[in-house]
Image (spheres, rainbow, N blue to C red):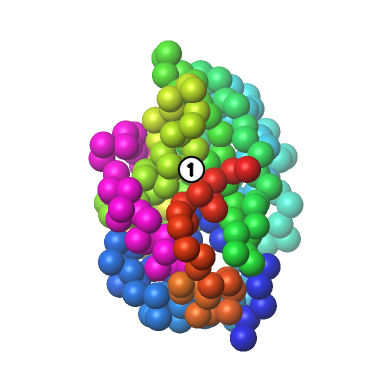
């Protein structure tokens, strides 16, 4: 059985969900999770997030990107991260102000859960709670976006006095071999899945993690509160 203490984030729900994130089957999803736990290494985009203020502020020129994102031995990994940063630079374009949020995960039922957003972006008199999908191979589809929007709203917006709107930035490759593309989705809660659908999806995913040996059994009562920052 896989050990506990594994780390997941909101993007992992649609990544491993089967057959879909809304209408998930815990048994089939647990098989996907188990396959991941038995796999090899992966790319980390963690170096991007402490540098978001520079990217948003328009300071991430080509020299900055070349210098700051070259820590992997494999050139293709460095270039993949640099491509993601260039797309972020293209979107933000020196507009607005960025406020980073803590990235430390919280413990939930035996596994670790990362915050779903990277920060709050203030621009043109509005606030946005920004989720960034930097994973090249994880394309976000409409049902994924609607799921993520509800998650961002419930976990990061609902108690924020700035009333931010979920903003999902997808930097994945939509067509194999064509490279990353920039897709930005402003997702007010009215466009998200319902709270009941989100609760059901979260419960089913935790059941999948339990079956994979990653999580403890679900308790009675509200499940979503366990994923909120505390």
Label the magenta part by its dominant secondary structure: helix
Residue 13 location, quadrant: bottom left
Dot 1 corresponds to which residue?
A: 155
Does residue 181 lie above or below 26 as drawn?
A: above
Identified at 32% across, 34% down, the residue is 188
Which residue lies at the image location 58% right of the left edge and 79% below the top edge? 213
Residue 217 visible in the shown view? yes
Is residue 143 positioned above or below 30 on the image? above
Q: Nearer the viewer, residue 44 or 206?
A: 206
Residue depicted at x 50% and y 80%: 211
x and y percent of residue 16 in the render?
Answer: 43, 68
Question: Is residue 83 visible to us here?
Answer: no
On whether residue 197 falls in the magenta region, the answer is: yes
Q: Quadrant of the N terminus?
A: bottom right
* x 60%, y 59%: residue: 108
Q: Secondary structure at mark 1?
A: helix
Is 176 rendered above or below residue 98? Answer: below
Highlighted range, magenta: 182-206
Residue that sits furthest to the front in the current view: 220
The quadrant of the rendering that contains the C terminus is top right
In this rendering, the answer to whether 11 lies above or below 206 is above
């Amino acid at each position: 059985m896989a050990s506990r203490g594994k780390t997941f984030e909101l993007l992992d729900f649609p990544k491993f969900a089967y057959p879909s994130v809304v209408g998930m089957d815990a048994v089939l999803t647990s098989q996907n999770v188990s396959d991941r736990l038995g796999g090899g290494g992966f790319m980390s985009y963690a170096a991007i997030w402490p540098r978001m203020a520079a990217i948003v502020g328009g300071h991430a020129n080509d020299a900055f990107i070349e210098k700051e994102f070259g820590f992997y031995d494999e050139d293709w990994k460095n270039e993949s991260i640099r491509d993601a940063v260039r797309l972020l630079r293209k979107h933000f374009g020196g507009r607005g102000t960025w406020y980073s949020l803590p990235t430390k995960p919280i413990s939930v039922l035996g596994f670790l859960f990362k915050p779903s957003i990277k920060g709050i972006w203030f621009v043109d008199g509005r606030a946005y709670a920004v989720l960034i999908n930097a994973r090249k191979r994880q394309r976000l589809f409409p049902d994924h976006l609607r799921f993520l929007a509800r998650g961002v709203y419930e976990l990061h917006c609902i108690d924020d006095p700035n009333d931010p709107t979920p903003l999902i930035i997808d930097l994945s490759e939509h067509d194999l071999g064509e490279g990353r593309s920039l897709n930005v989705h402003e997702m007010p809660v009215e466009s998200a899945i319902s709270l009941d659908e989100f609760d059901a999806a979260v419960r089913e995913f935790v059941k999948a993690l339990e079956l994979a040996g990653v999580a403890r059994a679900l308790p009675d009562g509200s499940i979503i509160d366990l994923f909120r920052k505390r």
